[in-house]
Image (spheres, rainbow, N blue to C red):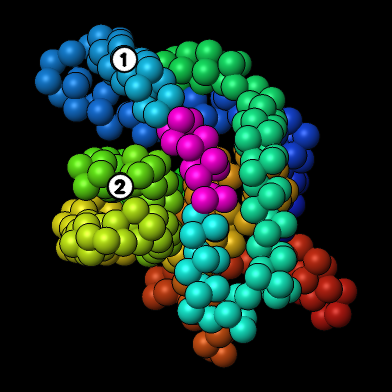
């Protein structure tokens, strides 16, 4: 006997609730495994390309693993120490910038930024707090972050999980495909393909855009000689997945520091501005169309909402799964909207059986009611 749609909805609804509960209870524990799964998904097309070149799956996976380990080691040896050094230098320099800014504004607008005004007293308190406790607060934030993320465990387990998942990725996909419910397998495959297309366009493409922009901004600002240019450039690149936010934050910070550093030589201030204007041109006309595509189905507002909600519910693990879940929910939402637009609820017309297709048999309770009233089924 066929299982009713209502019973199937109950079954899958309970399954999703159990999954969400497990994610909430085991969020920090699952973090290395989710990160490893994300790395495997991201690198699977590379492994497929290497297989097309004649390498076996295990050799292709080993080549990718060695390349990633070498790149990560180089990052730890060169980029991370430079970033930490520039963060510490920026924390120390902020009080000096505040002094210069308040001095300039005090000379121009003494009635507002005078020495004894309320605004200046508040700025003075902020400056004193940063001067006295800035490095202490920074060290506490770094120590707390490392503790929350179980950083050492994450660095050890996530690459191992990614290696084994990447090695067996095609077999796992085939296994999942084999256990799909037969009645709904075509629909599930269609939704999975659409979700994969969104993720491939956004996650893989946007991550590549972020890396390219981060490297460009960092190198260009360092060539100009801007203080903390490496930190600002990498920060602008890392948050470039939110349209315009990365460039606006980077532009504001870099031009602000350039005003203090190059006040007597306006050419370098204009050069700093030109770095970001050129970066925006390249991103909008070359990187985004070719790497991400014009329509990947993830609206920036929907993405921000997903990051906020999943981050609040599940912490850093929620941030990690926010984009994939947002993509999946977006595809499923569009599918449900499509079904709604085809349904009698929207059209107001009864469903007409196709020619040559017999109408569905009435439910058992309707047959019993007919027999009870006129005696003939």
* Residue 42 visible to the viewer: yes
Q: Estimate the spatial distance between the alpha carbons at disc 1 and disc 2, rounded to whole Å.
A: 29 Å
Other-residue count near label 2 (Cα within 10 Å), few / some / many at <14 / 14–19 / ≥20: many
Q: Main secondary structure of the magenta part?
A: helix
Residue drawn at 60 percent across, 16 percent down: 153
Q: Is residue 296 visible?
A: no
Viewer-side residue, 57 vs 236: 236
Q: Quadrant of residue 208?
A: top left
Q: Position of residue 39 (x, y in %)?
A: 42, 29
Quadrant of the drawing holding the C terminus:
bottom right
Looking at the image, is mark 1 or mark 2 earlier in the sequence? Answer: 1
Residue 47 location, x and y as percent? 27, 24
Q: Residue at x 39, y 75 (%)?
A: 355
Question: Is 52 placed above or below 209 here?
Answer: above
Q: Which residues are magenta?
A: 83-96
* Residue sitting farthest toward the bottom: 348
The answer to whether 276 is drawn above or below residue 225 in the figure is below
Query: Which numbered mark, 1 or 2, is in the foreground of this view?
Result: 2
Residue 92 lies in the magenta stretch: yes
Which quadrant of the figure has residue 296?
bottom left
Q: Return the residue at label 2.
A: 226
Residue at 71% across, 65% down = 122
- For disc 1, the marked residue is 70
Image-based side of 252 in relation to 34, left or right: left
Q: Residue at x 48, y 30 (%)?
A: 84
Left or right? Give the position of 354 relative to 367: left
- In terms of depth relative to the viewer, which is nearer, 285 or 361? 285
Q: Secondary structure at mark 2?
A: loop
* Magenta span includes 336: no
- Percent across and percent down for residue 53 are 12, 20
Considering depth in this image, is 277 or 328 the residue closer to the camera? 277
Q: Secondary structure at mark 1?
A: helix
């Amino acid at each position: 006997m066929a299982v009713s749609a209502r019973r199937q909805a109950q079954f899958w609804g309970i399954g999703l609730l159990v999954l969400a509960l497990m994610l909430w209870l085991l969020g920090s524990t699952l973090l290395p495994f989710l990160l490893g799964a994300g790395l495997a998904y991201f690198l699977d097309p590379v492994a497929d390309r290497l297989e097309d070149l004649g390498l076996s799956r295990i050799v292709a996976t080993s080549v990718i693993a060695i390349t990633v380990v070498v790149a990560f080691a180089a990052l730890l040896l060169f980029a991370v120490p430079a970033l930490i050094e520039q963060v510490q230098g920026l924390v120390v320099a902020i009080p000096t910038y505040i002094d210069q800014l308040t001095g300039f504004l005090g000379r121009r607008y003494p009635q507002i930024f005078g020495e004894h005004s309320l605004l200046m007293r508040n700025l003075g308190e902020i400056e004193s707090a940063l001067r006295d406790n800035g490095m202490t607060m920074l060290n506490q934030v770094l120590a707390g972050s490392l503790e929350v993320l179980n950083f050492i465990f994450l660095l050890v387990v996530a690459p191992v999980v990614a290696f084994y998942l990447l090695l067996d990725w095609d077999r796992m996909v085939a296994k999942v495909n084999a256990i799909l419910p037969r009645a709904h397998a075509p629909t599930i495959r269609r939704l999975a393909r659409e979700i994969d297309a969104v993720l491939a366009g956004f996650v893989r493409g946007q991550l590549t855009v972020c890396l390219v922009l981060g490297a460009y901004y960092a190198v260009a600002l360092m060539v100009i000689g801007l203080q903390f240019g490496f930190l600002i450039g990498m920060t602008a690149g890392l948050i470039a997945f939110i349209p315009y936010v990365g460039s606006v934050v980077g532009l504001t910070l870099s031009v602000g520091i350039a005003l203090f550093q190059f006040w007597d030589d306006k050419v370098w201030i204009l050069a700093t501005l030109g770095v970001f204007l050129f970066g925006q041109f390249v991103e909008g006309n070359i990187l985004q169309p070719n790497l991400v595509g014009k329509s990947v189905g993830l609206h920036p507002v929907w993405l921000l909402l997903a990051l906020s909600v999943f981050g609040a519910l599940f912490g850093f693990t929620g941030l990690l799964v926010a984009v994939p879940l947002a993509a999946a929910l977006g595809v499923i939402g569009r599918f449900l909207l499509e079904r709604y637009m085809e349904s009698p609820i929207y059209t107001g017309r009864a469903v007409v059986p196709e020619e040559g297709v017999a109408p569905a048999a009435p439910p058992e309770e309707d047959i019993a009611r007919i027999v009870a009233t006129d005696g003939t089924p």
